Amino acid sequence: MNDQLPVFVFGTLRHGRENHHLLAGRFERFLVATLSDYQRVPSTHGYPLIDVREGESVEGELYFLSEETRRETMIDLDHLEGLPPGGLVGEWYERVKRVVATEEGDFLAWVYVKPRE
């Protein structure tokens, strides 16, 4: 698993939202970012999901995690999103590698998306 990738967030982990404390003080920088060919979809658990949808996009933030806290931060994010320890797929989210666009160019990043069924 390559935890060196930045993390794209689109919901409660963004600045000013209720779960941002899991990222606060643990990143070197962040950029406004866009994930193409995905859209927000309803969920029954009350938090945003994103799923594949050609031609749509999701706005979010891209976090470049601090080297010192990267592993711990990824564990905390996976736990928040309901992924089992060491796994990439949970009931509500799957952590996948996707390209996101920023004003500084495109970056390969971890993204939590609706799991494939």
Image: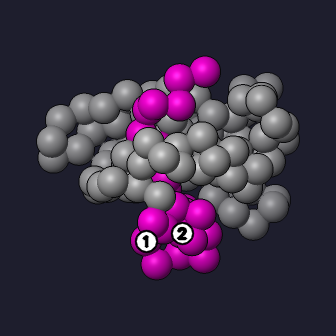
Q: Which mark is residue 20?
A: 2
Looking at the picture, which amino acid does disc 2 mark? Answer: His
Residue found 77% across the figure and 30% down from its top: 86
Say whether residue 112 is magenta: no
Vertical order, 13 against 5 (above or below): below
The 10 Å Cα crowd at callout 1, few under 14, some 14 to 19, many 20 or more, is: some
Q: Residue 71 occupies which quadrant of the picture?
A: top right
Q: In this view of the protein, can residue 87 be seen by the observer?
A: yes
Residue 15, disc: 1
Q: Which quadrant of the structure image shows residue 15?
A: bottom left
Judge whether residue 90 can be spotted in this image. Answer: no
Taking 37 as reference, is 42 left or right?
right
Asked whether the residues under the numbered discs 2 and 1 touch, taking CB atoms below 8 Å apart as contact, a structural biologist would say yes
In three-dimensional space, the C-alpha distance between marks 2 and 1, rounded to whole angstroms, equals 6 Å
Residue most extreme to the left: 104
User: Residue 59 at x, y = what percent?
Assistant: 38, 54
Residue 48, image x and y in percent? 63, 58
- At 52% from the left and 44% from the top, the residue drawn is 70
Q: Is residue 12 above or below residue 29?
A: below
Name the one closer to the observer, 35 or 5: 5
Region rendered in magenta: 1-25
Residue 93's mark? none
Q: Is residue 21 magenta?
A: yes
Say which quadrant the N terminus sits in.
top right
Which residue is painted at 15% across and 42% down in the image?
A: 104
